[in-house]
Amino acid sequence: MKRSILWGLFAFFLSASTHAAEFLVMSDAEKEVIRAIVRETLREYAAALNDKQQATSNSKEILREIVQSNRNFMQKNKPAYFAHFADGQHPRATVVTCSDSRVQSHALDATPDGDLFMVRNIGNQISTAEGSVEYGVHHLHTPLLLIVGHVACGAIAAAAGDYSKESNSIKRELDTIQIPKGDAGLSSIRLNVNNQVRQAMNMFDQHIISGQLTVIGAVYDFKNELNQGLGKLNIINVNGETNAAKIARLDLMRGLDAPLAKGGRAKSDH
Ligand SMILES: [Zn+2]
């Protein structure tokens, strides 16, 4: 064990036990010095421990696969592929979606690189990500803002239940999800998407009125709970319109909702 770690631990125990009473009467500045020593000690100790522990073998394997995947990506893509990223980005859509690992951009866009400005958090909510969403709309000028909820959402399940024992950070995000208690199903998932669309419309009303921005709400369905096909992105809200028949008649939607043909391609592809 490093000397600095020993010193730090010594300082920690000294402050925590022998001088517990004195700690209470210390000035804030003195307490902060002690806390900084403890934090630094724990950081060094964790790093030294981490490198030796057997428990990190999982992390090692995952990191190895990520590094290998990245190498494959580098080899697959020629310099020309990256050349047009160098001078900035020009995405066509700002997308607010859940962090859920089952929801990924390749389900929405065959070539998401440079195309989708992704904002992700638990519950695909705008309140804790307003700056990011605003950046996509105001600075990158994406004509589309797509809010994507999904079936079997853990954030919706949590928000529908008692999450009072969660950390303040998690509570702060779940507090933004306004759904009835006890209902973690599709109606709550849809309600949350509709609430987020409403919030986006309040934020960007001028852009919507002038026709510069369209806000879309959708539910990505990897369980076919909506009976529209496995993996379908179901559009449930267009600029605040939630009536399915009215949405289907919008010019924006023409030819988009053709059912899949046997080969898996949409009929409109033929
Ligand atoms: Zn989710």
Image (tube, grey):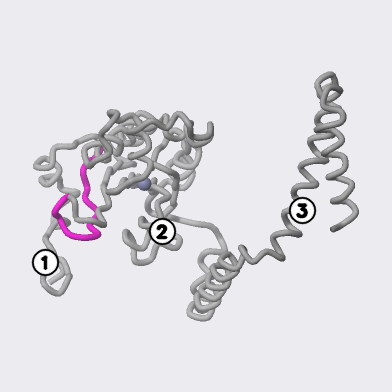
- What's the residue at 36%, 63% (across, down)? 106
- The magenta segment: 226-239
Quadrant including the C terminus: bottom left
First in sequence: mark 2 or mark 3?
3
Residue 44, image x and y in percent?
78, 53
- Residue 132 point in image, percent of width and height: 49, 42
Q: Earlier in the sequence, mark 1 or mark 2?
A: 2
**Residue type pointed to by label 1:** Lys
Q: Are marks 3 and 1 in contact (CB under 8 Å)?
A: no
Q: Residue furthest top?
A: 25
Ligand 1 within 8 Å, label 3 CB: no
- Where is residue 107, by image quadrant? bottom left
The N terminus sits in image quarter: bottom right
- Residue that label 3 marks: 45
Location of residue 158 in the rendering, given as x and y in whole percent from the top left corner: 37, 37
Residue in the image at 38% along x and 30% along y: 162
Image mark for residue 267: 1
Res. 115 mark: 2
From the viewer's side, name the closer residue of 174 and 112: 174
Question: What is the three-letter code of the residue carrying label 2?
Answer: Asp
Is residue 270 toward the left or the right of residue 34 in the image?
left
